[in-house]
Amino acid sequence: MRVTGTGHAGMRIDTPGGSILCDPWVNPAYFASWFPFPDNSQLDWEALGRADYLYVSHLHRDHFDAAHLARFVSKRATVLLPEYPTSELEDQLRALGFADFRRTTSNEVLELDGGLRVMIQALTSPTDGPIGDSSLWVEYGGVRLLNQNDARPTDLSRFAELGHVQAHLLQFSGAIWYPMVYELPTAAKTAFGKQKRDRQFDRTVRYIDDLKASWVFPIAGPPCFLDDELWQFNDLGHDEGNIFPDQQAFLDHYRSLGYDNAVILLPGSVATLTADGCRTTHPVDDVAAFFADKEEHLREYAARQRPVIQAAKRSWRHPEIDVLKELKRRVEPLLDESVYLAQGVGGPVRLDLVGHDGGSVESIVVDFPAKQVRRYADEKVRYRFRTQRALVEHLLHVEEVDWVNSLFLSCRFAAARIGQYNEFVYAFFKCLSEERLQYAEGWYAEQKPDAEDARLGDWVLQRRCPHLKADLTRFGRIEDGVLTCQMHGWKWDLATGRCLTSVGGNTLRSQPAGAPVQ
């Protein structure tokens, strides 16, 4: 089995039974804020695109690059389709010209031609990607690979059941906007960023320890930020709170823990896997030296992409759009139908739109209890976002149904909140369509408390995390009476069961070991 790195979460898997192209991403994503790192635009995409199978893990735009798929990937490729609750991924691929689909069943092995076997595990909670994320398992001739990309399954036991895995490819770096965009003192932002960076590494190592693959490949990050306005988000080794560490930074951390089985895939690197070995070639003579010269690479990359960024910015403005009127038209019907999401948000959300002149600000409120969109009336709000009016005009112009997969991941906004993180705010702005909203409402309606308990240290607590059901015997860590679930970093006070991370977060059932049963 041969794995060619194509950048970020992308790769091409070649076997005698067929080839699979996974998540090819080249063009900038999220309002031209994210770019693949390192630059992968010079690969031979014509050749890479002549694959037997195409696997797109989910619809996040650093995995689903519509322009690239349309131009470079053969429409003769058979699409391996995850079992998602909505048809959006298939619909968008069909619109690009793909016509041959193999629909998979989550966690069931599919026998393809030529002895190639695959399995896709689909995750389908409203917080998994844009209504869905997935992992791909591949086997040929007794050699097995797991492309976990940036999916976060509660455990990897299903993959382990199928036999020892030679190659485990998974995310290690940040793919979020927190805490960089929040209006916080610099010291607090650094401290929160360091906590998140540490949690990312801890979660990655926990997955690695669970699967025990022969070789580990850190992928699916980081992006790089080539616009001068966002340059500070690149990790150049000066900020311990930067949440976008690169592959070399993870490799150094991983080695410090005593591991020696990690392999970096640059765009153009080729790893040849056998049952008992891995041989890798790279497009550069010295991988460590490449990362040591990272800033030089990024400066040159930014110079090449500056015209692309400038052209993108010119396309965003649509001053003919009445933002308040369009938001009312699109959002108020969804508010009327929302029960669980509206209750979860629990109050008004304020949007401050900076005008085209750079000075004037229009403030609009999405009032969840009142089920209306209106002008801000000087009331107190718990959640506030500030961004350029042109970005919201563009979202309305293209009828974007997922503001997380566009505005928020772009990091082109500032945020403030009173209290803790509230997942329902972002879940709603991810579900700006009838289909998505109804799915999310139904998913939350079906959640049931977990009855199984487990002992963790000196505490007995419910085994499954109240957030997204991660197994706390695997992902739970207790320190100073606080439980942290390493899956997403959520915290609970064990003495009271109170969620410390999110307003409205479910309480945790917990008590000291040996205490009388309540």
Image (cartoon, rainbow, N blue to C red):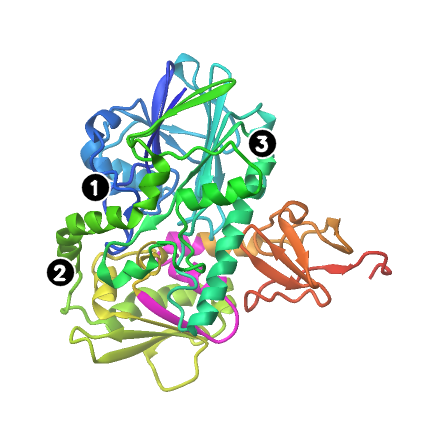
Q: Position of residue 450 (x, y in %)?
A: 68, 52
Left or right: 68, with 162 as reference point: left
Task: Measure how far apart labels 3 and 2 are at the Cα level.
Answer: 49 Å
Q: Is residue 385 magenta?
A: no
Establish if 480 lies above or below 157. Answer: below
Residue type, mark 2 in image: Arg
Q: Which mark is residue 314?
A: 2
23 lies above or below 492: above
Q: Which residue is mark 1?
A: 67
Along the polypeptide, which appears first: circle 3 or circle 2? 3
Secondary structure of the residue carrying numbered label 1: helix
Residue 249 picture location, percent across and down: 43, 46
- Say what secondary structure mark 2 lies in: helix
| Residue stretch in magenta | 413-438
Q: Decide if residue 151 is in sight here.
A: no
How crowded is the residue under tag 3: few (<14 C-alpha within 10 Å), some, or many (20+)? some
